[in-house]
Amino acid sequence: MNNFLFDKILLGIGILIQVRLLIYFLSRGFKNVNEKYKNDEKKRKVNIFLGWFFFVWLILGTIGSIIIIILF
């Protein structure tokens, strides 16, 4: 198999996984964090910050992967 084609297939699978994680965060992820730590404000803020950081990282990774697939 051509390495170029194999790389495109792997990037495509990576994008599918990233999009699935983004959908999870948008649908339930932040709601679960808010409910789980509603009595402990400090833990809730830390977990929301980490959740947003991971969420933004996923968005940038997905966009970057799409750009790489288009360019190469």
Image (cartoon, rainbow, N blue to C red):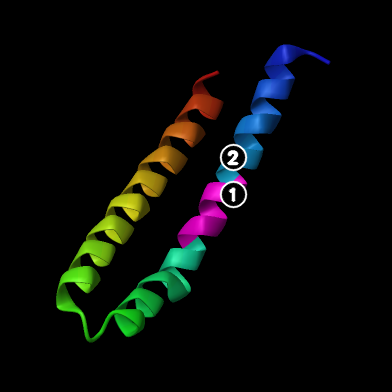
Question: Range of the magenta residues?
Answer: 16-22
- Kindly indicate whether the residue at mark 1 contacts the one at mark 2 (C-beta within 8 angstroms): yes
Dominant secondary structure of the residues highlighted in magenta in the image? helix
Q: Nearer the viewer, residue 57 or 1?
A: 57
- Specify the farthest residue to the left: 42
Secondary structure under the numbered disc 1 in the rendered image: helix
Above or below: residue 21 compared with residue 38: above
Residue topped by disc 2: 14
Secondary structure under the numbered disc 2 in the rendered image: helix
Q: Residue at x 46, y 30 (%)?
A: 67
Residue 56 highlighted magenta (yes or no): no
> On residue 71, which mark appears?
none
Q: Residue at x 21, y 63 (%)?
A: 46
Can you say which quadrant of the picture contains the C terminus? Answer: top right
- Specify the farthest residue to the right: 1
Q: Residue at x 49, y 25 (%)?
A: 68
Q: Residue at x 63, y 37 (%)?
A: 12
Quadrant assignment, res 9: top right
Above or below: residue 35 compared with residue 15: below
10 Å crowding of disc 2: few (<14), some (14-19), many (20+):
some
Amino acid type, callout 1:
Ile
